[in-house]
Image (spheres, rainbow, N blue to C red):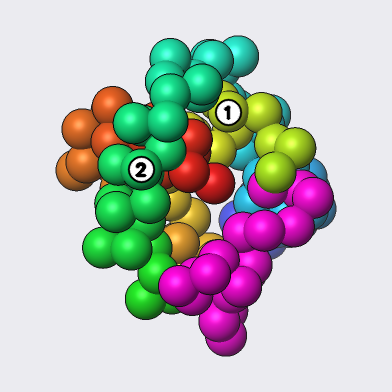
Amino acid sequence: MKRMRWIAGLSAVLALAAAGAAGSLIERAAAGASPRTNPVANSEEARRAGAKLYARNCASCHGANREGRGKAPPLVGREVVEAAPGALFWILRNGSLRSGMPSFAHLPERSRWQIITFL
């Protein structure tokens, strides 16, 4: 009987956690992201480097023109354009197994900021 109550309690906690995780990946990332600012935000050189990095690392899923493909959402919409840089950085660093977004923590930090500048 104790075990059944424990399992029921655990199920309730997991259900609450799942409900709290609802929303877009950007919404979820914003909650855990630091208020970081993009150190290369206004650099044309960084934007060009970001475009090359995007083509190599992101275009196969999100499309050459950021239009999205299949499960990978478009990256030209308002939510991405207006997202806090720290939230986008968090997504690139951590990814999301649930949504199929891989982590790009293997890329140097500067490269991730360059991709964000391009976006």
Q: Secondary structure at mark 1?
A: helix
Q: Nearer the viewer, residue 77 or 93?
A: 77
Q: Which three-letter amino acid code belongs to the residue tagged 1? A: Pro
Q: Is residue 12 above or below residue 115?
A: below
Crowdedness of circle 2 by 10 Å Cα count: few (<14), some, many (20+)?
some
- Residue farthest toward the bottom in the current orientation of the protein: 70
Q: Quadrant of residue 45?
A: top left
- Relative to 22, 102 lies left or right: left
The crowding category of the residue bearing disc 1, from other C-alpha atoms within 10 Å (few below 14, some 14 to 19, many at least 20), is many
Q: Which residue corresponds to mark 1? A: 85
In the picture as drawn, the residue positioned furthest to the front comes out as 44
User: Mark 2 to mark 1: distance in Å?
Assistant: 18 Å
Image height check: is 74 above or below 27?
below
Q: How many marks?
A: 2
Residue 22, image quadrant:
bottom right
- Residue at image mark 2: 48
Q: Is 13 part of what is drawn in magenta? A: no
In depth, the one of 16 and 84 nearer the eye is 84
In contact (CB < 8 Å): disc 2 and disc 1: no
Please report the residue visible at 45 percent of the width from the left and 72 percent of the height from the top: 64
Q: Position of residue 24 (x, y in %)?
A: 73, 54
Along the viewing direction, whichever of 79 and 12 lies nearer the viewer? 79
For the magenta stretch, what is the residue range? 62-80
Left or right for 83, reference 102: right
Q: Is residue 73 magenta?
A: yes
